[in-house]
Amino acid sequence: MAADFDPRLTPARPDIAASHLAGKVKAARFVDGVPYEVNDPVAPMRRAPQSDAPLDTEALMGERVTVYDIEEGWAWGQLENDDYVGYLPANALAPPALTRSHKVSAVRTLAFPGPSIKLPPLHGLPFGARVELDRIEGALAVTSAGYVPFRHLVPVADRGSDYVGVAERFLGSPYLWGGKTSLGIDCSGLVQVALNACGIHCPRDAYMQEAVIGTSVPASNFQRGDLIFWKGHVAIARDAETMIHANAFHMAVAIEPIAEAVARIRDGGGEITSVRRL
């Protein structure tokens, strides 16, 4: 692969690559991708086609993915939302056939097999998962994923106005490298989920976010919504003195004083690399 192509964002392997990369990268063959969408509540995107490979990110129900290769139960492709490339379980995908009109607005909700919340749930749906809404029956919405509390859904076009508030809803969620849900989330995943909920396009990894989001401001006089970056880490300022971040120190999404976090990370050899203001 050419040195100037980020492998995490470039659908190219020595044996196969996307057709639009012909002449730009080396590969044995070039193919057109096939559109799919995630049909499971959450699909892991892994670095290699095996269940114990590192988790690079997660794709949520309704996310589109362009698939270039399917082999031995694994689909290799690129996510539409943030261009991330990796391996997804093929059985978590389906050809796009639904009108995903609504998305989950609760940090997590349940889908039931029938019109009663007393029934054993089919599965949990994460914040941001997209479903097709058929009709409303009382307090439940009949969707492509099952019967879901209607109050936990909003139209896909709905945009929040406070991404800090969105991030705060994940407070206490366990830290998971590559995670993007309340069952496990990492620092850049928290930022991406929060910004996406407010209609702000956001890359997946911290170094990608630092390169393109907002404008650089001095690392002082923090304002609500400032993104504070270290090498390999990002946090969101809640105000001039506190921040929220998913981190491996607390192994959770936590709120803490900015000064304390800066001192602790500095003791580990890390300095703030930039502060970005949207």
Image (cartoon, rainbow, N blue to C red):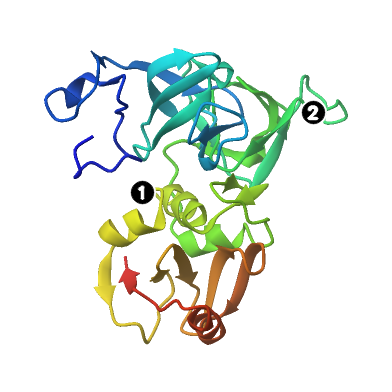
Q: For the residue carrying disc 1, how many other residues have a C-alpha within 10 Å: few (<14), some (14-19), or many (20+)?
A: many
Residue 139, percent across and down?
Answer: 72, 33
- Depth check: give the residue in front, 152 or 243: 243
Q: Which residue is mark 1?
A: 203
Placement of 74 over or under 167, stated as above or below: above
Marks 2/1 in contact by CB < 8 Å: the verdict is: no
First-in-chain label (2 vs 1): 2
**Percent of width and height locating residue 74:** 52, 20
Mark 2 residue crowding within 10 angstroms, few (<14) / some (14–19) / many (20+): some
> Residue placed farthest to the left in the image?
23
Residue 130: which numbered mark, if any?
A: none
Name above or below for residue 88 compared with residue 5. above
Q: Nearer the viewer, mark 2 or mark 1?
A: 1
Q: Residue at x 61, y 30 (%)?
A: 51
Nearest the viewer among 210 and 137 is 210
Picture residue at 47% right of the left edge, 78% below the top: 269
Q: CA distance from mark 2 to mark 1?
A: 33 Å
Which residue shows up at 42% across the image and 26% down it? 64
For label 2, the SS is: loop
Quadrant for residue 275, please give it. Answer: bottom left
Residue 90 image point, x, y percent? 53, 18
- Left or right of residue 170: residue 137: right
Secondary structure, mark 1, is: loop
Labelled disc at residue 121: 2
Amino acid on which the number 1 mark rests in the picture: Pro
| Residue ID at (26%, 72%) | 216
Compared to 277, does 261 lie above or below? below
Residue 167 position by quadrant: bottom right
Mark 2 belongs to which amino acid?
Pro
Is 265 left, or right, of 205 in this rendering?
Answer: right
Q: Is residue 63 visible?
A: no
